[in-house]
Amino acid sequence: MTQKTDHILEARNIKKYFPIKGGIMKRTVGHIKAVDDLSLSIVKGETLGIVGESGSGKSTLGRVILRLLEPTDGRIYFENEDISKLKNRQLRPLRRDMQIVFQDPYASLNPKMNVQELIEEPLLVQTSIKKRIREEKAISLLEKVGLRADDRLKYPHEFSGGQRQRISIARALSLNPKFVVCDEPVSSLDVSIQAQVLNLMADLQEELNLTYLFIAHDLSVVKHISDRLAVMYLGRLAEIAPKKNLYENPLHPYTQALLSSVPSTDVLNRRQKIILKGDLPSPANPPSGCGFRTRCPKAHDRCAVERPELMDAGEGHMVACHLYA
Ligand code: SF4
């Protein structure tokens, strides 16, 4: 089924539940609701940043959107085509257009392959282009990500963490994708290197007209690269807005708490730090009503009995909180 919109990607009512097995018979005794009825769309050429604590479901969402994990329910449209139910064989051509950069460049690069082989591997699997062209492409990609042509004969262990992530990016770009899920690509890097890799990704986006879904656990990381930001909590969207609106006027108490812990250089307008009580509840046993109510400083009676849905707060700003109903 196809539908016409300006979105390169649209996810509708996505659920991803992982079964919990128990007893001698290993029966399903419950579910971890990693993503629970979440909808969002991404416009061609933009970067949508997704932020949330560890366990919020953001990485699972990225993998479901790419169909690396099967959705339990919901629809995924890529360039207006419903890809939710496509079989592996039908997904194969789409894999060229949709790529992922993983968090850990140490684990995601095969240590037995040299850089040339690592970058050429997707081309070998997905295309029939000749060896000489593949080699030229690998050199060109290495130079694009700030490495030298000579580096192609080295192995991953010969590089620093930042350089390895550059190799991962070159590999992800080898098939000329349109859409890239960036799953915490700078979280494992030193702060000084993070900015270099983020700048590289922003430059490549402009040069190659890429669309990014950029996942992070820290609002300060996604601030510069994102056009819009979505905040996830317990598998659901708490808030989504254009970057400026979200930073200047956060509506959801969870977003307000996250932003209050981002270091600010603006001495006159520093936010008062909001300390959240407790930990993220288990997605296997989420609280009734609003998932955030056990930690929310503004929780009231209604929050325990009714789950807030995303509401339009104007100018593309949506929030799921009863305070704005
Ligand atoms: S719905 Fe209630 S508990 Fe949830 S964020 Fe809003 S005020 Fe807090």
Image (tube, rainbow, N blue to C red):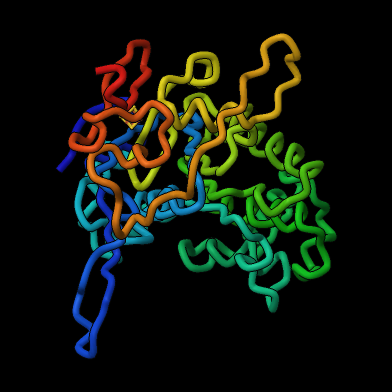
**Farthest front residue in view:** 301
Pick the residue in front: 265 or 10.
Answer: 265
In the rendered image of this protein, does residue 122 appear above or below residue 242? Answer: below
Pick the residue in front: 49 or 87.
Answer: 49
Q: What residue is drawn where x is 62% and y is 19%?
A: 271
The quadrant of the picture occupied by the N terminus is top left
The quadrant of the picture occupied by the C terminus is top left
Q: Quadrant of residue 7?
A: top left
How many tags in the picture?
A: 0
Q: What residue is drawn where x is 68% and y is 49%?
A: 141
**Farthest bottom residue in view:** 24
> Is residue 219 visible in the rendered structure shown here?
yes
Q: Is residue 150 left or right of residue 42?
A: right
Q: Is residue 223 left or right of residue 255?
A: right
> Could you say where residue 210 lies in the image, as x and y percent from the top left?
52, 36
> Could you say where residue 221 lies in the image, as x and y percent from the top left?
64, 36
**Farthest left residue in view:** 1
Q: What residue is drawn where x is 57% and y is 67%?
A: 121
Q: Quadrant of residue 240?
A: top left
> Could you say where residue 247 lies in the image, as x and y percent from the top left?
54, 20
In the rendered image of this protein, does residue 259 appear above or below residue 161? Answer: above
In the rendered image of this protein, does residue 317 appear above or below residue 89? Answer: above
> Could you say where residue 131 lies in the image, as x and y percent from the top left?
62, 66
Q: What residue is drawn where x is 41% and y is 25%?
A: 252
> Is residue 98 visible in the rendered structure shown here?
no
Q: Quadrant of residue 312?
A: top left
